[in-house]
Image: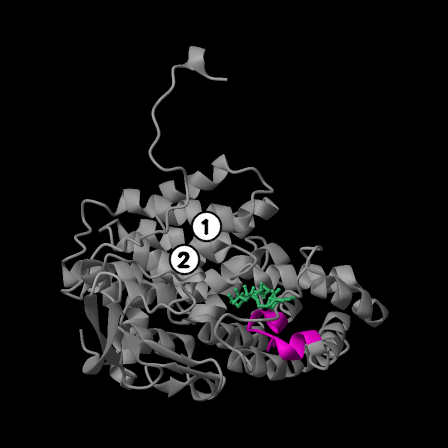
């Protein structure tokens, strides 16, 4: 525990006369947290917080979000500065190790990642077991989980060197696995990584190159992808990161924990939103249809939500969405596609929704994924691969959180409690006597 404790709340149960001291733990910035660890012992009650909307599950030194002010900091550095000046590999180093690297440290780190980009050939054969139209997220989750079979006996989670090798391996290999999933969907041969390329450029190479002709890398696309990776690299205790922490807290093999994170990310309320946004824009089709879809989004009986809008934490704006919107303009212009109709539609939809009382009163703003799909598709990445791109970037965050958790001597298994509302004790009735 590094958070300071200066004051405490006292909670009393008038009926029993018992009370509990709840220390208030303060971090460096942001809201303090009430330490309720003694509550059950003192008062025999749990706290009830569905969706963990008001619960800090852990201390963390990695990422800070101020949802009301639209602030996102990685290890203290504002996302706008990192997006403007840094690279994904530098951000990965920062998130994993806590400080910006020197030039020598960055070169060494990048070299370590490059060294591990290939995957075992037998792992490649796993893809043959999938139908050609299997969703790439399903393939990536399964193949990442199967890495635990390759690195099990050699992975001691309490050995810092083993943890370091794991972090390099998974960050290096997840693009190779992602690209193999894409090639499997297309029925094209797998393309081996090229270690002379930067991380994002290598992703594009493995996705788009074919063995029969040279692949010409588009630097605009590589730069855009690198920036998208920076923006998606971490987001504190989001659903997939919390999943990785929970799975990892049991002492499970970390590749299996990362695979659990991939699965959690896939849902449309989380990382799957980028794919859903593009599907939605295509469904809306034209500016004239926007009012009809906005009405559906407001209608609670329709199950239709404006995908890419709203966020559990950001109630002002998502700073990443702002950066991506600007980037969309730049990338589409540089690629000669500034008249992209989906981008036009997205801009109009945002404009109209942001004036609508329903969205204004609920503080629903575009999130990181409202515009990311437009960029992915402009650089040729198919819709089913959008969430996989997110997973590649977020692997860095997952690993940073897993490392933070495992190296904490106070780590305990994550085990939430419940408010039981099922039947009270009752006696078993023989089947012949049941009515
Ligand atoms: N469209 C329409 N209404 C919405 C939307 C939306 N996108 N998002 C929230 N609302 C409404 C809810 O219906 C609710 O209305 P009510 O108060 O009248 O019942 C209110 O706004 C609050 O919404 P909650 O669902 O309680 O907010 P929560 O914090 O639980 O959910 C979430 C956040 C999941 C992101 C939600 O806004 C959503 O489903 N958005 C669309 C999916 C999406 O873009 N997800 C990506 C998130 S970013 C990321 O993970 C990378």
Q: Foreground: 15 or 311?
A: 15
Q: Is residue 128 visible?
A: yes
Secondary element at image label 1: helix
Marks 1 and 2 close (CB-CB < 8 Å): yes
Left/right of residue 123 with respect to residue 181 in the rendered view: left
**Is residue 74 depicted above or below 18 in this figure?**
below
Secondary element at image label 2: helix
Residue 104 in percent (x, y) is at: 25, 82
Residue 172 covered by magenta stretch: no
Look at 49% across and 46% down and name the residue there.
138
In the rendered structure, which segment of residues is drawn in magenta?
A: 358-372
Q: Which residue is mark 1?
A: 140
Q: Is residue 172 visible?
A: no
Residue 361 in percent (x, y) is at: 64, 78
Q: Is mark 2 within 8 Å of ligand 1?
A: no
Look at 58% across and 62% down and name the residue there.
273
Q: Foreground: 198 or 419?
A: 419
Please tell me how crowded label 2 is: few (under 14), some (14-19), or many (20+) other residues with Cα within 10 Å: many
Left/right of residue 40 with respect to residue 256 in the rendered view: left
Look at 81% across and 65% down and name the residue there.
292
Please tell me how crowded label 1 is: few (under 14), some (14-19), or many (20+) other residues with Cα within 10 Å: many
**Location of ligand 1 given as a quarter of the image:** bottom right
Of all residues, the one furthest to the front in this rendering is 15
């Amino acid at each position: 525990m590094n958070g300071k404790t200066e004051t405490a709340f006292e909670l009393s149960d008038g009926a029993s006369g018992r009370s509990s001291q709840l220390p208030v733990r303060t971090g460096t910035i942001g809201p303090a947290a009430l330490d309720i660890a003694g509550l059950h012992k003192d008062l025999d009650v749990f706290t009830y917080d569905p969706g963990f909307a008001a619960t800090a599950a852990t201390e963390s030194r990695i990422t800070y979000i101020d949802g009301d002010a639209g602030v996102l900091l990685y290890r203290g550095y504002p996302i706008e500065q990192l997006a403007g000046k840094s690279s994904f590999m530098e951000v990965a180093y920062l998130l994993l190790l806590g400080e910006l690297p020197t030039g020598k440290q960055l070169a060494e780190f990048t070299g370590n990642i490059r060294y591990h980009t290939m995957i075992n050939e037998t792992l490649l054969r796993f893809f043959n077991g999938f139908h050609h139209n299997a969703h790439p997220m399903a393939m990536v989750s399964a193949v990442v989980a199967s890495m635990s079979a390759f690195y099990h006996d050699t992975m001691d989670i309490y050995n810092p060197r083993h943890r370091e090798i794991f972090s390099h391996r998974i960050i290096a290999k997840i693009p190779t696995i992602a690209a193999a999933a894409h090639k499997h969907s297309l029925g094209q041969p797998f393309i081996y990584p090229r270690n002379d390329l930067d991380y994002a450029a290598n992703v594009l190479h493995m996705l788009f190159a074919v063995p029969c002709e040279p692949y010409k890398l588009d630097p605009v696309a590589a730069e855009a992808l690198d920036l998208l990776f920076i923006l998606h690299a971490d987001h504190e205790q989001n659903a997939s990161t919390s999943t990785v922490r929970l799975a990892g807290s049991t002492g499970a093999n970390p590749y299996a924990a990362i695979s659990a994170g991939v699965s959690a990310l896939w849902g449309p309320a989380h990382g799957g939103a980028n794919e859903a946004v593009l599907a939605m824009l295509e469904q809306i089709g034209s500016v004239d249809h926007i009012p009809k879809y906005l009405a559906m989004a407001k209608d609670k009986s329709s199950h239709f939500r404006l995908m890419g809008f709203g966020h559990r934490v950001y109630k002002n704006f998502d700073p990443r969405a702002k950066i991506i919107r600007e980037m969309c303009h730049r990338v589409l212009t540089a690629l000669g596609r500034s008249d992209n109709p989906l981008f036009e539609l997205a801009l109009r939809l945002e404009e109209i929704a942001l004036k609508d009382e329903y969205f204004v009163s609920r503080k629903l703003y575009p999130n990181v994924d409202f515009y990311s799909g437009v960029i992915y598709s402009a650089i040729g990445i198919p819709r089913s691969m959008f969430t996989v791109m997110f997973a590649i970037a977020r692997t860095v965050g997952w690993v940073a959180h897993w490392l933070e958790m495992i190296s904490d001597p106070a780590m305990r298994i994550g085990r939430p409690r419940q408010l039981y509302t099922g039947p009270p004790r009752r006696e078993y009735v023989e089947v012949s006597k049941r009515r």
